[in-house]
Amino acid sequence: MQLNYFTKVISTVKNWMTTALLCALAMAFAWQGAFFANNTAMADQASLIATIDNSDRAKSKVSEDTGRTKNFIRETADKVEEAARSNASKVEDATDNNGSFVERKAKRDAATIHKRAEEDAARTQKAVDNTKNVVQKAVDNVKDAFGK
């Protein structure tokens, strides 16, 4: 009988101690302001001016890189077209008959490759321009957000 009585008392004391410890911890956190801290950040005006200057540099860098990328695309399209012309002339030189089926097919293929290279280059350059515009709009939006 005594064992049950002591077990009950120990269990009750354990519950009260746990509750008291949790309350003490909650008061300590509230006292230190861990849950109620005001952590808003205020930007310095000097750093805002630097951000505006950086945005102009970013926009000029985007324009410069866009120009380089478009030149690379154009050079690649020219190399593809030159390879198609070269292959067509090799086929023409290899065939003895002027106007043979293989020769005509090689010339048609070269024309198709030339056409597709131009179309692909134009599409890719348009995509580069669209990307440039998106980046510049994003820079302008950031600049406007910090400028006001």
Image (tube, rainbow, N blue to C red):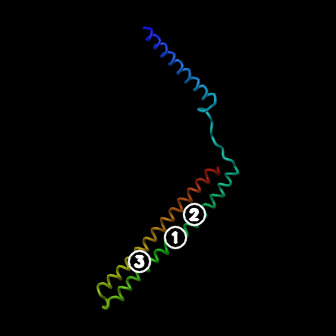
Quarter location, residue 136: bottom right
Give me the residue at 47% from left, 12% from top: 6
Q: How many marks?
A: 3
Q: Which residue is mark 1?
A: 70
Residue positioned 45% across, 68% down in the render: 123
Query: What residue type is disc 3 on?
Result: His
Quadrant location of the N terminus in the rendered image? top left
Q: Position of residue 125 (x, y in %)?
A: 49, 68
Can you tell which mark lies on residue 114? 3
Q: Give coordinates of residue 93: x percent, y percent.
A: 36, 89
Residue 77, image x, y percentages: 46, 75
In this image, 57 relative to 105: left or right?
Answer: right
Q: Residue at x 56, y 66 (%)?
A: 65
- Labels 1 and 2: the sequence-earlier one: 2
Residue drawn at 43 percent across, 70 percent down: 120
* Local crowd size for mark 2, using a 10 Å CA cut-off: few (<14), some (14–19), many (≥20): some
Between residue 22 and residue 116, name the one nearer to us: 22
Between marks 2 and 3, how big is the CA–CA gap? 30 Å
In the displayed structure, 44 sits above or below 107; it is above
Residue designated by label 2: 62
Precedes in sequence: disc 1 or disc 3 = 1
